[in-house]
Image: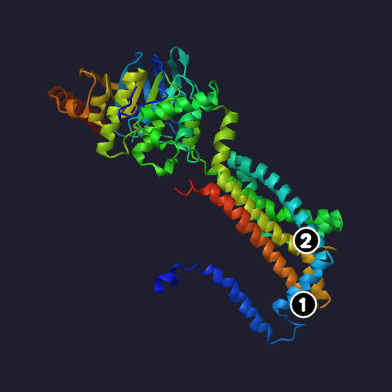
Amino acid sequence: MMRRLDKFNWGWASLPFLLLCWVLVASRFPSYILPQPWEVMAEAQRWIADGSLLQHLKASLLEEAGGFALATLVALLLGTTAGLFRRFRDFISPLNSLFMAIPPVAWAPLTMIIFGLGYWSIVMVIFIAAVFPMAITMQEGIQSIRNGEVRAARTLGATPLQMIVHVYMPASLPFFTAALRIGFSQAWRALVAAEMIGASKGIGWMVSMGGQIGNTNQVLLGIVIIGLIAWLMESLVFKRLEKHYQTWRAH
Amino acid sequence: MTNHNGLTMANSQPVQRVAATLAIDSINFSYPNGHEVFRAFSLEAKPGEFIVLLGPSGCGKTTLLNLLSGFQKPASGTITINGAPVRPEMPELGYVFQSPQLFPWLNVLENVRFGLRMQNRLSAKEQTEKALHYLALVGLDQAADKLPYQLSGGMQQRVSLARALALEPALLLMDEPFAALDAITRNNLNEETLRLWSELGQTVVFITHDIDEAIFLADRVVVLEIAPGGIHSELAIDILRPRSNLGTRKLPRFIEYRTALMEKIADVVHANLSVL
Ligand SMILES: Nc1ncnc2c1ncn2[C@@H]1O[C@H](COP(=O)(O)OP(=O)(O)OP(=O)(O)O)[C@@H](O)[C@H]1O
Ligand SMILES: [Mg+2]
C-alpha cells in the first residue's frame, strides 16, 4: 500500500485539487464576484461560438511570436559575442543587470507613445522582457564550452568556421534551448501585462476589459487561457527540447 | 585480418605507414608571468621512433607538448615537423590529451570520424569505414553507437586514441594519456599502444612521470630537468619487441633500467632541492 502511494505521481493530483478549492470557495460567493468553473466554461463556449476568442488569441500569439523571434535573434548576437569576448562581456553585463532589474511592463507607456497603440508597442515590451535573460543564458552556454574540446577540435584539423559549426554550436545547444524556454515565458508574462495596460485586443485585454465591465467570467476565462498556453508551451515544446539536448551534458 | 579480440574486421584496409621527423632546435620559453621553463632546449625524433619524455611534476612536460603542437610559441628557436613549423591544425600531427576530451554530444563513431569529416577528403561512407576500422583497432567497434558518458575512463581514452589515429598522423603526441587510469587498465593500454604503433609505424612522443611505463614503451627515454632546464640525460631502451606485460616487465634488464632511471630522477629532484 505504502509502495503504491510512493510510486503515484502526485503532480496529477494538483489540478483536481485546485478545481475542488475553486468550487468550494466559489460556493460561498455570488457568481458575479466569483463564478463556478462551469460558469466560466459556459462563457468560453460563447467566446468560441462567435469567433472572438480565436481572434484575441491570434492577436496575442502574433505579438508573442514577433517579440520572441526578435529577442531570440538579438540575444543570439549579444550572448555569443559576450561569451566569446571578455571585453564585450565586461561592457555589457552592467547594462544587462540594469535592464533585468526593471519590470518590462514599466516600458509599456513609453513604447506606446513612441510606436502608438498597437502591434509594435507590445512587441517592443516583449522584446525587452525576453532579450536580456536569453542573452545571459546563451553567454553562459558559450562560456561553458571547455577549452579541451576546442583544442581537440583544432588538432583534428577544424578551421575557424568549422569550429563554430561543429564545436561551439553543438556544445552550447542545451543552453540555447534553455534560453528559448526562459525567453518565451518572460515574453508571455510581459505580453499579458502590456496588453492589460494599453491594447484593443488580445488575451490580456480580455482580462482587463472583463474587470472594467465587471464580468468575472471573462476575467477568469482569460486567466485560464494565459496559464494554459504557458503550460502547453513549457511542457510540450520546451521541456522536451531541453531534455533531448541535455542527456549528455548531465554527466 | 582480425584484431586482438579475434573479431573479424569487415572493413580492413591497408594502413599507411608514415612517420615524421620532429626537430626542436634550441628553444627558449617563459610564461608571461616570467616563469622560465625552457632554456636552449633541443631534441630530435627520428621517423618511427618512440620517444618517452620522463620528468617529475612541474618540470615542464605539458608546456613542452603545448609547444610541440603549436598551441604555444617559443620565444626563440624553432620546432619543425618534416621541416615545416608546427601548427595545431597540421595533418601530420595527432594529439592524445591527458583527459580524453571527447565531444560529449557525438557518439563514439562520430567522435572518431570528426577529423575525417573536417578534412572532407573521403566520401561519408569511406569516412565511416575508416572510423570503424580504427575503432576496431582499439577494440571498441561494438561501442560505436554509445555516447562518451556511457564509457569507462579507459574506454574513453581508447576512443580518444582512435580519434587521433584515424587521421593517420605521422607524429603522435601523447600527454600522460593513461595517468588517470588504474594500474591494470594502464598496463593494458600500454600494450595496446605498442601494438598499434608497430602496425602504424608513426613517430611518437609520449609524456609520463611513470618510470615503468617509460621503459615499457620507449626506444629512448629522455629525462627532463626541472624548469628552467633542458635534458638531464637520455637512456636507450634495448629491449626486444614485441613487448608484453607478462614477459617484458620482469626481465632483469627492465629492472636494471628502472634502477638507473630512479637514480636519475632522484638526481633531478635532489639538484632542484639544493637550489631551493
Ligand atoms: N600558465 C602558466 N603560467 C605560469 N606558469 C605556468 C603556467 N603553466 C605552467 N606553469 C609553470 O611551468 C612549470 C611547468 O609546468 P607544466 O604544466 O608544463 O609541468 P608538467 O611537467 O606537465 O607537470 P605535471 O607532471 O604536474 O603535469 C611549472 O613550474 C608550472 O608552475
Ligand atoms: Mg602536465
Q: How many marks?
A: 2
Instruction: Indicate the position of residue A202 as horizontal and vertical percent values.
Output: 80, 62
Q: Is residue B273 left or right of residue B80?
A: left
Instruction: Indicate the position of residue A204 as horizontal and vertical percent values.
Output: 77, 65
Residue B107 shows up from this direction: yes
Residue underneath mark 2: A57
Distance CA(mark 2)–CA(mark 1): 19 Å
Packing grade of label 2 (10 A; few <14, some 14-19, many >=20) is some
Instruction: Name the foreground residue: B23 vs A245.
Output: A245
Instruction: Name the foreground residue: B13 vs B41.
Output: B13
Disc 2 is attached to a residue of which chain? Answer: A
Q: Which residue is at a point 47% across and 40% down the rendered structure image?
A: B104
Q: Is residue B127 left or right of residue B47?
A: right
Secondary structure type for disc 1: helix
Residue A142 shows up from this direction: no
Task: State whether residue B130 is above or below residue A128.
Answer: above
- Labels 2 and 1: the sequence-earlier one: 2
The quadrant where ligand 1 appears is: top left
Q: Is residue A211 left or right of residue B47?
A: right
Secondary structure type for disc 2: helix
Asked whether mark 2 lies closer than 8 Å to ligand 1, one says no
Residue underneath mark 1: A216
Residue that protrudes farthest toward the top in the picture: B83
Task: State whether residue A44 is above or below residue A130.
Answer: below
Instruction: Indicate the position of residue A227 as horizontal and vertical percent values.
Output: 68, 65
Instruction: Indicate the position of residue A231 as horizontal and vertical percent values.
Output: 64, 62
